[in-house]
Image: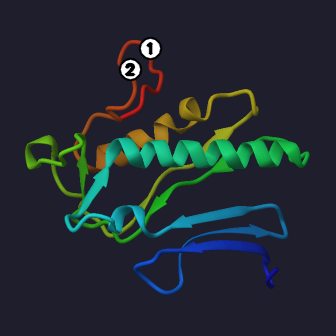
Amino acid sequence: MNFDGLVTYTSTRREVGGYSYAQVFRNGCIEVVDSDMLGYHEEKIIPGGAFEKYILESLGNYISGLNKHGIAPPLLLMLSLLNVKDYEMAVSATFSSHDRMHPIDRQNLIVPEVILEDFSNDPSDIMKPAFDVVWNACGWAGSRNYDTKTGKWVGG
């Protein structure tokens, strides 16, 4: 428990202190922070497939928990990437330079929010516009983890 509500965190073996946390505020808002994913590689890259998969898995867990505790939609979902100037989107497991377009031109990406109207909606469908904006910031037309014909998330 803390002043704002309830917080939980994890820490890495590399550092002292938390690298990720979830803060559940007294008003029902939930803030989730992961400061390790983008700092894992020495290069300034966003691992396109792993990035989306992690967010979707986490979101699924939070939606399940909210549903279990009787919290009803709609939910406003917001995604922010902080301190990402000069990061590039890596689209292959080798993170080779020919798979990238161009670096992000600003320090912070505050992605337009998306709304989850119903818990039966697939989180990957809801998050596609947010993911597309992050990919746009890296020079791509949209997320490469969605099938171009069906628009469904196929992973990365």
Query: Could you tell me which secondary element the residue under label 1 belongs to?
Result: loop
Q: Are marks 2 and 1 in contact (CB under 8 Å)?
A: yes
Q: Quadrant of residue 140?
A: top left
Measured as percent of width and height from the top left, residue 13 is found at: 45, 77
Residue placed under numbered mark 2 in the picture: 147
Q: Quadrant of residue 136?
A: top left
Count of numbered circles in the view: 2
Question: Which one is nearer the viewer's eye here, 111 or 37?
Answer: 37
Residues packed near mark 2 inside 10 Å, few (<14), some (14 to 19) or many (20 plus): few
Q: Can you say whether 118 is above or below 77 in the image? A: above
Measured as percent of width and height from the top left, residue 92 is found at: 22, 40
Residues packed near mark 1 inside 10 Å, few (<14), some (14 to 19) or many (20 plus): few
Query: Could you tell me which secondary element the residue under label 2 belongs to?
Result: loop
Return the residue found at the far left. Answer: 98
Q: Is residue 44 left or right of residue 150?
A: left
CA separation, marks 2 and 1?
6 Å
Question: Which one is nearer the viewer's eye here, 54 or 80?
Answer: 54
Residue placed under numbered mark 1 in the picture: 150
Q: Amino acid at mark 2?
A: Asp
Q: Amino acid at mark 1?
A: Thr
